[in-house]
Image: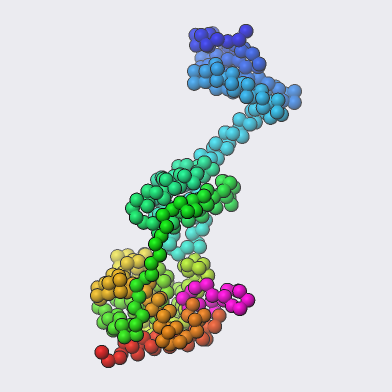
């Protein structure tokens, strides 16, 4: 006889050690114990008896228990063991709960940390901890949608006007999800669906001085700079090596061979992800030799003024330029690259491929292969020395 809601509600435990059993039909029954009332389903698989838990009353009503029974019997008809299916579902839910975006993100940070410079690792970690983890960190990667990333992360950042950072953060989210795909925790990178949905970044050129007379004035200003010794050294070295500001300020003493007049930057520090070699002019070596007694005991050539454990702040060179009277619309730390690119080509008439290679841009040979870090090294040494000599010449020209 089928059970009723009233009976299920009113029935009491009668004292049986294993609890009383009340059948409802189709193998389902209610087991009443001192601790509570439990829905159960008995069935057979390959002739062997099995029991499936359908829930606990009153959280699971009689009607809901019957629906679960019917679903289990449909699985049996399809050759599926409902008990095994339930265990698999629990494992999947547990796996999803354990593999939230934050869990996968921190795993990605640890696993790929050797591919990034310390300053980059700190920046990426900061972005994730400030803008991403609080918004979507608790969502299982398998449940994350493109809409989650767009509305909870990108749109909130866009309200602050940091559009370039938004694009970078979405790229980081993409890298985390592709890592999740590779490690079997998610099927696809949903950020691919955001193409065209983000506010575009307005491209702007970094301000740079390229007129020879004004270059001379700039070099005289740099020579007369009286700020902190490490700032002065970084400022003097900037035009000589014309690296990206982040690559310069993160310079480590272990990367230099002053006897060979070479600076080898590891691939992890380079924007293009390729090891880069900078031939050092005589003037560059002298600057480094001069700063060695000041910072040579530590890791960084240009350590932070506040602590030697970090490299120089990203704003230090620009702040020094402002202190010398060069506004952001006139000259920037990044502008030393444009200055070198223009003057080396238009004034010193150096080979464009050598200039591009020294700028660490993607340069390929006639067969379409990327040059290695030592390609055309003698010619690049001559170019770098000619550049340093030229900067001395314009600096020393009469006013």
User: Secondary structure of the magenta portion, mostly?
Assistant: loop
| Residue 364 highlighted magenta (yes or no) | yes
Query: Relative to residue 390, is residue 361 depicted above or below?
Result: above
Residue 194 spot, x, y in % from top left: 49, 51
Way the structure is coloured: rainbow
Q: Is residue 54 left or right of residue 300?
A: right
Residue drawn at x 24%, y 75% as measured from the top left = 325
Residue 210 spot, x, y in % from top left: 36, 80
- Residue 58 seen in this snapshot: yes
Residue drawn at x 66%, y 25% as measured from the top left = 74
Residue drawn at x 33%, y 53% as measured from the top left = 160
Q: In this view of the protein, which residue sits in the foreground, 380 or 269?
A: 380
Residue 87 spot, x, y in % from top left: 61, 32
Quadrant including the N terminus = top right
Residue 180 spot, x, y in % from top left: 55, 49
Magenta extent: 357-374
Q: In this view of the protein, which residue sits in the foreground, 161 or 384?
A: 161
Query: Relative to residue 21, is residue 150 depicted above or below?
Result: below
| Residue 360 highlighted magenta (yes or no) | yes
Q: Is residue 123 left or right of residue 275?
A: left
Quadrant including the C terminus = bottom left
Task: Kindly indicate the quadrant of the structure image that contains residue 327.
Answer: bottom left
């Amino acid at each position: 006889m089928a059970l009723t809601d009233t009976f299920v509600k009113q029935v009491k435990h009668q004292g049986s050690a294993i609890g009383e059993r009340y059948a409802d039909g189709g193998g389902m029954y209610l087991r009443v114990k001192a601790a509570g009332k439990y829905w159960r389903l008995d069935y057979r698989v390959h002739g062997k008896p099995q029991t499936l838990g359908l829930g606990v009353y009153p959280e699971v009503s009689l009607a809901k228990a019957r629906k679960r029974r019917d679903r289990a019997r449909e699985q049996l008809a399809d050759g599926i063991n409902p008990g095994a299916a339930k265990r698999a579902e629990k494992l999947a839910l547990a796996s999803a709960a354990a593999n939230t975006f934050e869990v996968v993100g921190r795993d990605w940070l640890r696993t790929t940390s050797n591919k990034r410079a310390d300053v980059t690792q700190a920046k990426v970690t900061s972005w994730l901890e400030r803008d991403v983890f609080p918004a979507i960190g608790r969502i299982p990667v398998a449940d994350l949608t493109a809409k989650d990333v767009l509305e909870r992360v990108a749109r909130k950042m866009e309200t602050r006007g940091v559009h370039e950072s938004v694009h970078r953060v979405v790229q980081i989210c993409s890298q985390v999800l592709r890592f999740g795909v590779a490690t079997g925790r998610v099927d696809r990178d949903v950020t691919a669906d955001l193409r065209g949905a983000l506010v575009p970044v307005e491209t702007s050129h970094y301000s740079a001085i390229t007129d020879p007379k004004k270059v001379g004035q700039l070099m005289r200003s740099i020579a007369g700079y009286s700020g902190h010794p490490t700032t002065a050294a970084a400022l003097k070295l900037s035009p000589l090596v014309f690296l990206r500001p982040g690559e310069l300020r993160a310079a480590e003493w272990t990367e230099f061979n002053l006897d060979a007049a070479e600076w080898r930057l590891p691939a992890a520090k380079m924007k293009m992800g390729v090891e880069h070699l900078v031939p050092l002019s005589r003037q560059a070596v002298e600057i480094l030799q001069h700063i060695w007694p000041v910072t040579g005991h530590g890791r960084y050539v240009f350590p932070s003024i506040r602590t030697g454990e970090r490299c120089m702040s990203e704003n230090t060179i620009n702040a020094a330029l402002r202190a010398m009277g060069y506004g952001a619309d006139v000259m920037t730390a990044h502008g030393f690259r444009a200055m070198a690119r223009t003057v080396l080509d238009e004034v010193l008439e150096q080979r464009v491929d050598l200039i591009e290679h020294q700028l660490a841009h993607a340069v390929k040979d006639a067969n379409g292969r990327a040059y290695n870090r030592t390609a055309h090294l003698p010619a690049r040494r001559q170019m770098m020395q000619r550049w340093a000599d030229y900067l001395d010449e314009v600096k020393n020209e009469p006013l």
